[in-house]
Image: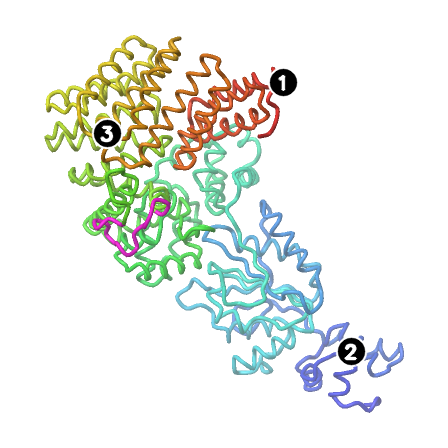
Amino acid sequence: MRAGLSQEALSHAAGVSVRALADMERGRTRGPQRRTVQALAEALGLDDSEAVSLEKSAAAGRPRARAATGAAGSGALALPRDIQDFTARGPALAGLLELAREDGPGRPAVTVVTGQPGLGKTAFAVHAAHRLAPHFPDGQFALDLHGMDPEPTTPRDALARLLGAVGVADAAIPSGTDDRAGLWRSLAGERRVLVLLDNAADESQVGPLLPGPGPTLTIVTSRHVMAGLPSVHRTDLALLRREEAVELLTRIIGPDRVRAEAQAARDLADLCGHLPLAVRIAGQRLLSRPHERLGKLVARLAAEGRRLDGLQAGSLRVRAAFALSYRQLPSDSRTLLRRAALAAGADFSPETGALLSGLAYDEAVACAEELTDAGLLQSDPAAERYRFHDLLRLYAAEQVDAEDGPGVRGAALDRTADWMLRRATAAALHFDVDHERTASPSDPDPDGAPTGREEARAWLEAERAQWLAALRHAHDAGRHRQVLDTAEAMHWFSDLNQHWEQWVEIFRRSADSARSLGSRQEEAVHLNYLAWAYNLCVHDPHAALTAADGALAAAVECGDGLQQGWALGYGAGALHRLGRMEEAQARLREGARCLASQESPQSRLAELTMLNSLGTLLRQTGRPAEALEIHRRSERICRDGVPGRTEEVIALYQAVARQQIGNDLAALKRWHEAEAPLRQALAAFDAAQMPIWSEQARLDLGQVLGALGHPEARGTLLSARDALAALRNPRQAEAAEALAALDEAGTGTGTG
C-alpha cells in the first residue's frame, strides 16, 4: 500500500471500520459506497485521477438488486406496490419523513409501527417507504417476517435474504445467525438503505435484523408493541377519524356515489368502526357492485349479528384479520378476550374480566396487558380499564358462542352479576344515613372494598354500566330479593346523582320485584322512589303521578303512614309540574299532616320535605309571605334536631330550608336579607358534594347578586348555567335567561 498505512491506521484516518476494510480486502464487499471511497481516497492521499479511477472500480463492483426467486438467501426484496387510494396518516408520515432527513449518531435507526388488527400498518409502512425512497438511494427492501404464521421466518433465514439483497454471494453468507447479523450490521452501516420488516412476531425475531448506527433506516410493523426494543422511534396508528374514513371510501368508490348518499357514507364509516380494513372491505364490495346503494349495505351491517359477515370482499375479511391474532394467544388470554365481550358498557375493569373469565385478579391483569400489547384491547390512559374496538368485540362474542356455549356463558354472567351486586350494595350503603360508613361484611371482597365515600363513589361511577347490567340479570333471573336490597341501598346515593336517567329503570325493576315477592309495603317504598326518579331524573310528571298514585294505594293497603306521606308529596310534585297548583297544594298539606302525626325520625325528615315543597309552591303561586312562614317553620324543626339523625343529615335539610328562605325573601324583593341564607345553603351543598343541589342554589344566589348589582353576579350565573347544562337540568334555561338579562342591564359584570 503506497501510503504505508496499516488497516488500523487507515481505519482511523478514513473513519471506516477495520471490519469493513477487511471485508473489502477479502472480496466480501466488492463495491463500497461512494462516500466510503471518497474517505479512503483522502486518507490515502490520492490525486484526482487516482480517486476517479478508484471510484470507477468501486462502482463496477457495487451490487445491483437481483430478481427475487423466493428462495431463502437469494433475490432482492423489492417494495410492494403502493396503494393509490392511501388516505390520511399525515402526522405519522411527517414524523417518518423528518426522521429520514435527520443524520448523525443520535438518529434512531429503527421505527416501529404498531396498532390493532385492521389499522393498515403494512399499507402505511409501504406508502411511507415509497415516500422515503429518494432519501435512501442505495436501496429499499421489504421482507415479510410472517409473524402471525404458525412458523414465523427465523432470523437466520431473514438475514440470508437481506444479505443476498445487498449483493453478498450465497457462498459468502456465514452459516451462523450471529455471524450473519454481524455482517449485516457492517454492510448496512455503510449504505443509505431503507428496510421494511413487515409483520414481525416479537423482539427476538427482529433484534438480529436491526442495523447498528448509520444511515440505514428500518421500518418494523407488528401487531405487538415491541416494548423490548430500545432506542427506537414509535408510530402507534390510531383509528381513522370519521371524515377520514369517509374520504377513504370516496377514493375507493368515487365521489359521485358518496355525494349521492352522504349520510349513508357517514353511517357506513361508523358501522365499520373507522377501522381502515373494514372501510376498505366495504368500499371494495361496493366497487364490485356499481349499481348497489350504500344504504343497502348500511342496513345489512346495522344488524350486529350479520356485521362481520357483511365485511368481506373476496379474500379480504375482517373476521380473518382478527382470527390471526386470536389463534396466536395463550389459552387464558383467549378466554379473557372472548369472555370480556360479555361485559356491559364501553369498557371493563380487570375485576370484571377476572369474574367473567374465571381467572384470579392478577392473572386477568396479566392477560389484559398481553392483549393490549397484541393490539386486541385498548387500555385507558389514566385508569386500569380496557376497551374493545366495536368489531373486535363482535368477533370475541362469536368465540364465546363457538367455544363456551350457553352453559358456560350463563355461569360466567351469573357469577359476575352476583359479585357486582354485592359490591354495589356495599358501596352504596356508604351514603345511607342509617348505615355505618365502613366496609360492609356483605362485600364479596372486604379487603379490596371501597373504604369511604370517595372510593365508593368512584367505584359506583366507574362500574355503573356493569352493576346496572347485573341488576337486570338478577331481575330477569327472578332473584328479586337481591334486586330489592341493591335498589334500597342506592336510595341515598341516587340523590347525589339525579342526572342519571337509569334510576327510572332501577326503581321500576325494584318495584316489580317487590310486587313479585308479594310485599305491598316494599312496593310502596319503591314506587315512591320511582315517582321521584320520574319527577327529577327524566322530568316526566305524568309517569311520576301514576307511580305516586300506585305507591299511595299500596301504602294505604298495608297501613304505612310514612309511605303515604311520601306518596302524597311525590304526587304533589308531579301535579305541580303539570300546572295543577291547587291539587298539588292540597296533597302537600295532607302529606304534611299525615307525617306530623307520626313519631319516627324518618317521618320528621319527610315532613321537612313536605313543608319545603309546600312553601316553594306557595311562593310560585304569588304568596311569598306565607311561603317564608312555612320555610322558617322548617328551619326551626332543623334547629331543634331530629332524634336518631346525625348533624350532617340535618344540616342538609337546614340548607334546603335556607335556600328557600332566601328565595322567599328575593320574591319579597328583600335582596340584602336574601343573600346570606343563599350563601349558607350553597356552602352546605358544596361541602356535601351534591352538585345537583348546589348548582341550583348557585343560580338562586346569582339572581339575587344580579339584583344587588354585585360584581360576583355574572361569574356566579355563568358557572351555574354551565354546570346545570352538564347535569341536564331544565333550570339551565333559567340561568341563561338571567345572564342575558344581566348583560342587557349592564350590571354585575364582574367575573366573580
Does residue 660 belong to the magenta stretch? no
Question: Sequence order check: which comes first, mark 3 or mark 2?
Answer: 2
Q: Residue furthest front?
A: 640
Element class at badge 3? helix
**Badge 1: how crowded within 10 Å, few (<14), some, or many (20+)?**
few
Mark toward the start of the polypeptide (1 vs 3): 3
The x and y percentages for residue 259 are 55, 29
Residue type at the position of mark 2? Ser
Q: Taking the image as drawn, is residue 707 in sight?
A: yes
Residue type of the residue flagged with mark 1: Gly
Q: CA distance from mark 2 to mark 1?
A: 88 Å
Q: CA distance from mark 1 to mark 3?
A: 48 Å
Could you tell me residue 550's position as x and y percent?
A: 19, 20
Q: Nearer the viewer, residue 714 or 275?
A: 714
Which region of the structure is painted magenta?
439-455
Residue 220, quarter of the rendered image: bottom right
Quarter holding the C terminus?
Answer: top right
- Indicate the secondary structure of the residue bearing disc 1: loop
Circle 3 packing at 10 Å, graded few (<14), some (14-19), many (20+), is some
Residue that badge 2 annotates: 57
Which dot, 3 or 2, sits closer to the camera? 3
Label 2–label 1 contact, CB within 8 A:
no
Please identify the quadrant where the N terminus is shown: bottom right
Q: Residues within 10 Å of mark 2 (few under 14, many from 20)?
A: some
Read off the residue under disc 3: 508
* Residue 56 visible in rendering: no
Q: Which residue is mark 1?
A: 746
- Give, as a three-letter code, the residue at label 3: Arg
Cα separation, mark 3 vs mark 2, equals 89 Å
Is label 2 in a helix, a strand or a loop?
Answer: helix
